[in-house]
């Protein structure tokens, strides 16, 4: 059976993403495209707590008793890239996220050690993406157990180990072809950003000492209560961003460390995603309560308004895809035709392929199947 050219291109892109699957942090040619901790409406609505340590590329602040958030500022460096944090009880501590580099994870441990001298029970990766795991070697060096969803270790081995210290021509081939075949100025700009992102991701993976989790958490073990002594956490798995995502809640203080299931003030990275399930997870976040404080995977600390904003972004992408499908516009053209609406102009975006194209593709296929 012969494939139409548009279908071939769509399949090539999906194959490329399946092979690369490098969500997390990457930067376009003009600079970083994701939100930082400063200058957004959500940050103004939720002022930061007392500063514990400022590393430039990230700052650690107390947001509640025993609870600290580490928020990245990508305008000042790329060592953490994502947000994380740590939790302190009478008996033990937990640290959250492995970050993009060992230096990023070391910054988190340095912040923790300023206020806490007891054992660290575990470091928990929210999911396998490189900006959440490439610093794990720092925890291994400190003899801290690394916990993650059971799918994290196998995905690191499948996606990153073959990429490390290897010829990158195949890894970059689809993005280079997209740039060569760009059909408009905007398409060319998007392709340039995609290619630059991949090159920088590959460089960070090359520089890392890839370190697998030492404890793989099966879905049957979750939710899991963790008592640190006077501070109880709940570790949960929710679908959406990757095949294996975790969140960490502090129920008594209505705080949620959401990993990349929540992007605040940014288009979400969807290349590994199940967007339909992700939207259901956002609905679940909405039921946590109106006073809930979220530490997102990227962007400033927020409340329920951050969840609502991300739901609105998904709704806009879905509406576009549905309209294109109803008009019979081929998928590649539908992806190119998406235009960021004026109300979203201030949002960050990793790169077009991983944020827009993949989301539009899933919503488009759902529309064709009559599911949306």
Image: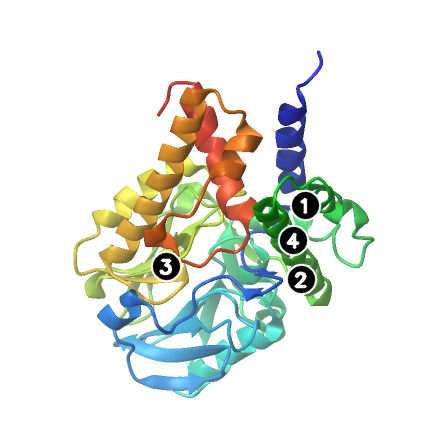
Q: Quadrant of the N terminus?
A: top right
Above or below for 308 versus 96: above
Q: Is residue 336 above or below residue 190?
A: above
Mark 3 residue element = loop
How many numbered discs sit on the rendered protein? Answer: 4
- The CA distance from mark 1 to mark 3 is 31 Å
**What residue is disc 3 on?**
265
Front position in the image: 101 or 125: 101
Q: Position of residue 259 (x, y in %)?
A: 42, 57
Instruction: In the rendered structure, find residue 158 and report the number of the disc placed on it.
Output: 1
Residue drawn at x 55%, y 74% as measured from the top left: 104
Marked residue nearer the N-terminal end (4 or 2) = 4
* Residue, far top: 1
Instruction: Please indicate, yes or no, whether residue 12 appears anywhere in the rendered image.
Output: yes
Q: Residues within 10 Å of mark 1 (few under 14, many from 20)?
A: some
Which secondary structure lies at badge 2?
A: helix
Q: Nearer the viewer, mark 2 or mark 1?
A: 2
Mark 1 or mark 3, earlier in chain? 1
Crowdedness near tag 3: few (<14), some (14–19) or many (≥20) residues, C-alpha within 10 Å: many
Q: Earlier in the sequence, mark 2 or mark 1?
A: 1
Position of 31 with respect to 72 (left or right) is right
Q: Which mark is residue 200?
A: 2
């Amino acid at each position: 059976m012969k494939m139409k050219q548009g279908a071939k291109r769509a399949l090539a892109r999906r194959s490329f993403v399946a092979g690369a699957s490098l969500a997390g942090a990457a930067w376009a040619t003009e600079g970083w495209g994701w939100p930082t901790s400063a200058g957004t409406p959500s940050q103004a609505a939720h002022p930061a707590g007392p500063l514990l340590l400022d590393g430039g590329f990230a700052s650690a602040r107390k947001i509640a008793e025993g609870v600290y958030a580490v928020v990245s500022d990508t305008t000042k460096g790329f060592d953490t890239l994502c947000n994380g944090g740590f939790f302190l009880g009478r008996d033990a501590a937990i640290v959250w996220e492995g970050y993009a580099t060992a230096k990023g994870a070391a910054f988190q441990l340095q912040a923790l050690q300023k206020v806490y001298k007891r054992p660290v029970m575990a470091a928990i990766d929210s999911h396998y993406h490189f900006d959440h795991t490439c610093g794990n070697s720092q925890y291994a060096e400190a003899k801290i157990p690394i916990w993650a969803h059971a799918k994290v270790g196998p995905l690191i081995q499948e996606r990153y180990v073959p990429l490390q210290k290897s010829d990158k021509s195949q890894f970059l081939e689809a993005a280079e072809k997209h740039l060569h075949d760009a059909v408009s100025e905007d398409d060319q700009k998007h392709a340039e950003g995609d290619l630059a992102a991949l090159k920088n991701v590959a460089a960070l993976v090359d520089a890392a000492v890839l370190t697998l989790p030492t404890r793989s958490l099966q879905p049957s073990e979750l939710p899991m209560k963790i008592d640190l002594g006077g501070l109880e956490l709940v570790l949960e798995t929710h679908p959406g961003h990757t095949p294996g995502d975790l969140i960490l809640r502090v129920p008594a203080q209505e705080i949620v460390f959401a990993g990349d299931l929540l992007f605040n003030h940014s288009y979400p990275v969807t290349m590994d995603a199940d967007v339909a399930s992700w939207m259901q997870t956002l609905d679940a976040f909405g039921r946590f309560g109106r006073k809930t404080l979220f530490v997102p995977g990227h962007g400033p600390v927020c409340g329920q308004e951050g969840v609502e904003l991300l739901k609105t972004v998904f709704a806009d992408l879905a509406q576009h895809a549905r309209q294109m499908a109803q008009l019979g516009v081929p998928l590649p053209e539908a992806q190119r035709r998406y235009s960021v609406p004026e109300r979203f102009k201030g949002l960050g975006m990793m790169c077009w392929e991983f944020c827009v194209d993949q989301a539009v593709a899933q919503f488009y296929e759902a529309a064709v199947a009559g599911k949306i």
